[in-house]
């Protein structure tokens, strides 16, 4: 299943139409947690989404160690510009503590 290629979803169009359907002007946030490796096609799809810079309807956050991200190419074989499209966010221990609490319940 790791080599299964799934067509890329155009989230910018999907979210725009979804908001029109609901008559709602909300902003969506998508968080991708790279806690384990996925297929290379998934990385390409995520990079394509990051590189498309669809900020009007969606904020995208990828939780990962940049050194372990296997590729910065998109489906169109373009390189995602790390300086412009990726950034490092330092988190304190509050998130880790909250996750531990959730796991205990």
Image (tube, grey):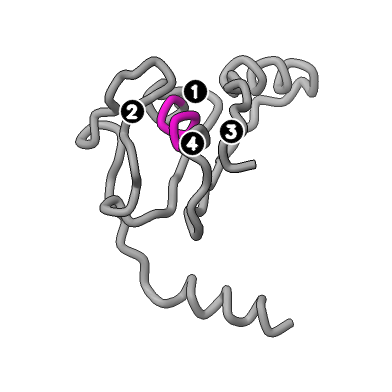
Q: Residue at x 39, y 24 (%)?
A: 74
Q: Position of residue 101 (x, y in %)?
A: 62, 81
3 and 4 marks in contact (CB < 8 Å): yes
Q: Which residue is mark 3?
A: 27
Residue located beneath label 1 in the image: 56
Q: Residue at x 63, y 26 (%)?
A: 6
Indicate which disc residue 59 carries.
4
- Residue 69 location, x and y as percent? 34, 47
Q: Residue furthest bottom?
A: 104
Of labels 1 and 2, earlier in sequence is 1
For discs 2 and 4, the disc positioned in front in the rendered view: 2
- Give the magenta-colored segment's residue range: 43-48
Foreground disc of the pair 2, 3: 2
Residue 90's x, y, as percent?
30, 62
Q: Main secondary structure of the magenta part?
A: helix
**Residue 73: image x %, image y %?**
33, 28
Query: Which mark is first along the chain, 4 or 3?
Result: 3
Spatial separation of the CA atoms under disc 3 and disc 4: 8 Å
């Amino acid at each position: 299943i790791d080599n299964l290629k799934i067509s890329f979803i155009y989230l910018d169009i999907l979210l725009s139409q979804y908001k029109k359907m609901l008559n709602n002007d909300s902003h969506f946030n998508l968080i991708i947690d790279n806690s384990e490796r996925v297929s290379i096609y998934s990385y390409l799809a995520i990079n394509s989404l990051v590189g498309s810079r669809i900020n009007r309807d969606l904020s995208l956050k990828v939780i990962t160690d940049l050194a372990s991200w296997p590729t910065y190419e998109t489906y169109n074989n373009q390189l995602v510009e790390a300086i412009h499209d990726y950034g490092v966010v330092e988190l304190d221990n509050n998130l880790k503590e909250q996750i531990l609490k959730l796991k205990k319940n």
